[in-house]
Amino acid sequence: MPRIVLEHVTKCFDKFVAVDDLSLVIEDRDFITLLGPSGCGKTTTLRMIAGLETPTKGKITIGDTVVFDSESGIDISPAKRDIGFLFQNYALWPHMTVYDNIAFGLENLKWSKGDIDRRVHEMMAMLKIEQFEKRYPSELSGGQQQRVAIARTLAPSPKVLFMDEPLSNLDAKLRLEMRSELKRLHVDTDSTFVYVTHDQMEAMALATKICLMNKGILQQYAPPLEVYDRPANLFVADFVGNPTMNFLGISPRRISQSSVAFTMLGHELVFSSKEAIPDSDDAVIGIRPEFIKLDEGPFSGVVYTTLPSGMETTVKIKVGDDMVTAVAFGSVDYSHSLDMPFDIIGDGILLFDRKSGDMIAEGMIQQA
């Protein structure tokens, strides 16, 4: 399987910059998710790697082959890049059976009938669709059609599999099941997967690395838990996580190289880090909801609203002019307007510089 390298890739549509100076390395056997809001450039990036979109400038290498280079005039066609592309609508031939749909690409590649038959049955067994061999797409459920589309895409053994929001047409339960299937399939095929989604939970669940983009610019490229625990900036912190992170503005006063004092939620507090804290006179404290411990502690507010889901309950607490979101694990609920004491725990509290938006320190909060 190949390594994919993007070097200073830019794509412009007239005056609109869809992807801006993107440099990225996708390692062999990675499962990369291109994540971000609508219009951020993730699908354009995928299509440029696949050869379905021509970059304005930059260089793209797949394995040992340069497939695009604006300076050298190289632009290898999609058919010669040895990749598979799974579209959002599956694009199955309605007049062909499951067997014929999977075999179609192999026939175009002039495989022998014996090799085609062996490969089709191998793919159907892998995707657990052998019983649908003689059915037509209209006779299959959405999840079954999805499996056929994956089998057809994988049949020619492409070096890389590209997927553009392939689960977006499925209902919530089926999406969850297919996420598990895709993750297992990635291990079974030992392939490189590049996957576009706007669903941050999907990206977290599937990826070995997340490439998070906004307005055509790469915001962070890291493993999912690193993106969650140590977001590079306020945009990443706000985009990843459900419920979203709490953001509280502060004016820090330096105490030492690795600690600052500030007023927040009606208390004088100290933020301490294991590393030196850069200077900032206008900052934002970021607290994940799971770091808010309910029912005890020095802070106090009033329950504004609750969202119980069985496994956990999201609780919004109004503290003066601020709103704090917490998560209570287990089958619990709270009455509206209930006085609620709480504490801020853990050493994963984040400090952001408001002007740049960058995350500048990670640490813990204590009473002054």
Image (cartoon, rainbow, N blue to C red):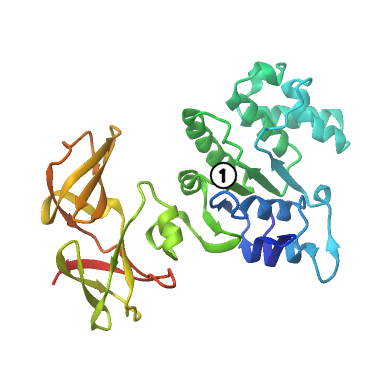
316 vs 47, left or right, is: left
* Secondary structure under the numbered disc 1 in the rendered image: helix
At x 70% / y 39%, what residue is drawn?
Answer: 154
**Viewer-closest of 126 and 266:** 266
Residue at the outermost front position: 321
In x, y percent, where is residue 40?
Answer: 59, 55
Looking at the image, how many numbered discs can be counted on the residues?
1
Give the residue drawn at x 53%, y 41%: 183
Which residue matches tag 1?
187
Mark 1: give few (<14), some (14-19) or many (20+) Cα within 10 Å. few
At which x and y percent is residue 4? Answer: 68, 60
Q: Is residue 253 left or right of residue 95?
A: left
Q: Quadrant of residue 332?
A: top left
Rendered location of residue 44, percent (x, y):
68, 53
Question: Which residue shows up at 34% across the image and 54% down it?
Answer: 245
Residue 62 appears in the picture as rendered: no
Judge whether 277 appears above or below 137 on screen.
below
Q: Foreground: 33 or 35?
A: 35
Residue 210, percent from left and from top: 52, 55
Tell me the kind of residue under disc 1. Val
- Residue 143 makes an appearance in the image: yes
The correct choice, above or below, for 360 with respect to 10 in the image is: below
Q: Specify the quadrant that holds the C terminus.
A: bottom left
Name the residue: 64% across, 43% down.
164
Q: Which residue occupies the extreme right position in the image?
A: 110
Compared across the picture, whether 247 is left or right of 7 comes to left
